[in-house]
């Protein structure tokens, strides 16, 4: 016998909005105050109160970040402990696998408190081991926590007493030689505060994560320590030929245009292999963003039989998992000018679900970025036909 009754349950379709961590960065470096902690920072924060009155790279780079990031900018700072930021005594060498300034523990500690899209190291790197450590740390965090991070590492500027630009270029060429690290950027120091300037340019809310730091319309660089072109040991000032040579060696460098005021950025180059898809930071960022959104959507589907191998379920879920791509593809039109979305709108077949085993579903995506004119060639024709000129 069944007793007449009505039972109502509230179902969760997990269709809500997920929080965005894009444009949130973690700066890592040494400071006199708050050592071993993670500090949130906004444009109005008192940097001296947070990091001490003494001058330090961490404070300078964060200040440069806010000058370029625009309104509403936000970041975190992971302050290294004294032991992590102190070089070894004379005659001592780091242990195998150790770094001169080991920022890895500070980044690992921060994972328990914050989630960010990128990490900005403020201590210059000088070895291939440090560069490789950044790429390996991305893999480690992704494997352990399902988070996607990119890294930007500064490289010390020229020694103007002992090095020429040719020697400096040769040294930096050797530093990146043979490294495959598609989520790592190397940023040489020429004017000072370059890495903070680049970070702010990438996080400016007036542009999307799909925009290159080379975008001139974003505006000139702000917050550089010095606007005078540095000189080498022979007294030769920095020129565009040197910057182009370093850009060809996968360095992310500033630049300028003749007869056009201001300093700008060349490109957000990464240490991607020849012919790879992630040679520029904007490609890394849009794919990382899609991966974060899709992961959050996939978790509630674990052992949920609504997702099954029937044609109806596959079609419904291919449409469902295409939602983040459609959102990223939304464009805006202002005054007749169309500002494109972060990616191109997905096509039929860009999301495919297959079942390699009875208990394993594979969901594959295609993301299509827009073409971007970083090199423009113009042709001018002269019409000397007098009949057409009447």
Image: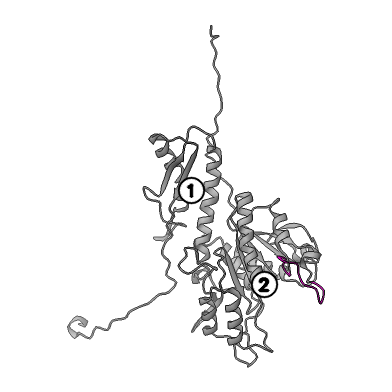
Q: Residue at x 63, y 55 (%)?
A: 140
Residue 171 visible in the shown view = yes
Nearer-the-camera pick, 14 or 313:
313
Q: Residues within 10 Å of mark 2 (few under 14, many from 20)?
A: many
Residue 223, given in percent of the width and then of the height, sits at: 64, 73
- Residue extent of the magenta highlight: 88-100
Residue 26, given in percent of the width and then of the height, sits at: 66, 60
Disc 2 from disc 1: Cα separation: 36 Å
Among numbered discs 2 and 1, the one appearing first in the sequence:
2
The residue that mark 1 highlights is 324
Which corner quadrant of the image does residue 47 belong to? bottom right
Q: Secondary structure at mark 1?
A: helix
Which corner quadrant of the image does residue 155 belong to? bottom right
Residue 336, given in percent of the width and then of the height, sits at: 39, 60
The residue that mark 2 highlights is 125
* Above or below: residue 121 compared with residue 9: below
Q: Residues within 10 Å of mark 1 (few under 14, many from 20)?
A: some
Comparing labels 2 and 1, the label whose residue is closer to the camera: 2
* Above or below: residue 324 compared with residue 175: above
Q: Residue at x 62, y 61 (%)?
A: 136
């Amino acid at each position: 016998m069944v007793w007449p009754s009505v039972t109502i349950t509230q179902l969760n379709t997990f269709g809500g909005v997920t929080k965005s961590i894009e444009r949130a960065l973690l700066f890592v470096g040494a400071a006199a105050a708050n050592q071993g902690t993670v500090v949130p920072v906004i444009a109005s924060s008192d940097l001296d109160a947070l990091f001490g009155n003494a001058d330090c790279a961490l404070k300078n780079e964060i200040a440069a970040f806010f000058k370029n990031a625009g309104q509403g900018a936000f970041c975190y700072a992971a302050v290294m402990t004294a032991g992590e930021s102190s070089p070894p005594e004379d005659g001592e060498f780091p242990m195998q696998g150790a770094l001169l300034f080991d920022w890895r523990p500070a980044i690992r500690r921060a994972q328990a408190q914050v989630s960010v899209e990128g990490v900005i190291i403020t201590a210059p790197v000088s070895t291939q081991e440090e560069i490789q450590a950044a790429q390996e740390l991305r893999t480690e965090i992704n494997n352990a926590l399902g988070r996607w991070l990119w890294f930007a590492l500064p490289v010390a500027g020229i020694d103007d007493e002992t090095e020429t630009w040719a020697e400096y270029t040769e040294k930096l060429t050797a530093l990146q030689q043979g490294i495959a690290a598609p989520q790592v950027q190397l940023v040489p120091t020429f004017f000072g505060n370059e890495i903070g300037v680049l970070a702010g340019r990438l996080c400016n809310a007036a542009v999307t994560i799909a925009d290159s730091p080379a975008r001139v319309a974003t505006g000139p660089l702000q917050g550089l320590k010095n606007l005078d072109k540095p000189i080498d040991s022979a007294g030769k000032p920095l020129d565009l030929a040197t910057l182009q040579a370093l850009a060809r060696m996968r360095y992310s460098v500033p630049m300028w245009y003749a007869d056009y005021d201001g300093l700008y950025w060349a490109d957000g180059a990464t240490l991607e292999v020849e012919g790879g898809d992630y040679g520029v930071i904007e490609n890394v960022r849009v794919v990382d963003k899609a991966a974060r959104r899709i992961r959050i959507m996939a978790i509630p589907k674990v052992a949920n039989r609504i997702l099954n191998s029937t044609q109806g379920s596959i079609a419904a879920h291919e449409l469902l998992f295409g939602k983040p791509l459609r959102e990223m593809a939304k464009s805006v039109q202002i005054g007749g000018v169309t500002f494109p979305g972060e990616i191109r709108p997905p096509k039929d077949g860009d999301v495919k679900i297959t079942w390699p085993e009875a208990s394993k579903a594979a969901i594959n995506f295609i993301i299509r970025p827009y073409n971007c004119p970083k090199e423009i060639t113009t042709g001018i024709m002269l019409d000397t036909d007098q009949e057409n000129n009447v």
